[in-house]
Image: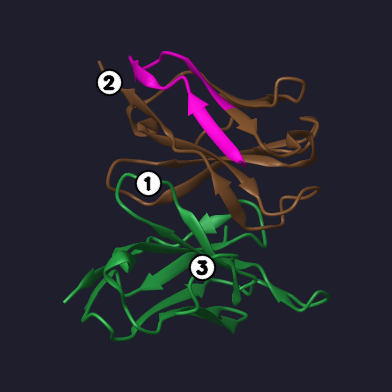
Amino acid sequence: DIVMTQSPDSLAVSLGERATINCKSSQSVLYSSKNKNYLAWYQQKPGQPPKLLIYWASTRESGVPDRFNGSGSGTDFTLTISSLQAEDVAVYYCQQFYSTPPTFGQGTKVEIK
Amino acid sequence: EVQLVESGGGLVQPGGSLRLSCAASGFTFSSYWMQWVRQAPGKGLVWVSRTNSDGSNTIYADSVKGRFTISRDNAKNTLYLQMNSLRAEDTAVYYCARPRLGGSYLYALDIWGQGTMVTVSS
């Protein structure tokens, strides 16, 4: 199984500041023939199901604010919230869907400083 | 509106059984591979199982293999998860989820149900 490791486990950021979450996979999730990274980012608020933010590592889902950006390739990925808003307080998960079983990172909790 | 609604959760004793349902609406259910993902209280997301669009191809996490069965009724737009020989470690919120596009499982999950809680305890 591909192991997804996120860092940090939690972070506190001031409103309007940048939040950066890292995700590392134990093997590459780049499908070379399609030139796509099979990596997604989800946001989960308390009591709610996960919400898809980013797929193919860097493609923003429709309706997701442009302050959310995904980057990276191969085994190293980053989710950046460029200017943290109060409504961004949540747990964020990366997920690889390159191989079965699809696996999630352990989650990163983002709070307001 | 595209929607998934789970039901069937509850309290069950160790060794017992439950069947979860996930009713789909607002999209062509029969075109999509469907998945179950679970989340233990205070913990992260764990993939459980998936089925292809007609139910002929299924796969499971090692932790549930031989105990859980995923199935679907495309005429009723409903996905199921039959859970047998339940253990305390199966306690979780169970979500059904749909990939962004039909015809494959190789997509991120863009539609999730609200989840149904399963508690295994004596």
Image position, residue A84 (x, y; %): 31, 78
Name the subunit of mark 2.
B
Image position, residue B16 (x, y; %): 41, 13
Name the subunit of mark 1.
A
Which residue is tagged 2?
B121
Frontmost residue, A58 versus B92: A58
Q: Which mark is residue A64?
A: 3
Quarter of the figure with the N terminus of chain B: top right
Q: Residue at x 79, y 40 (%)?
A: B31
User: Chain A takes which shade in the image?
Assistant: green
Amino acid type assigned to the residue bearing label 3 in the image: Val
Quarter of the figure with the C terminus of chain B: top left
Q: Give the chain ID for the brown colour.
A: B
User: Which region shows up in magenta?
Assistant: B1-22
Amino acid type assigned to the residue bearing label 1 in the image: Gln
User: N-terminal of the two: label 3 or label 1?
Assistant: 1
Amino acid type assigned to the residue bearing label 2 in the image: Ser
Q: Which secondary structure, mark 1?
A: loop
Q: Which mark is residue A48?
A: 1
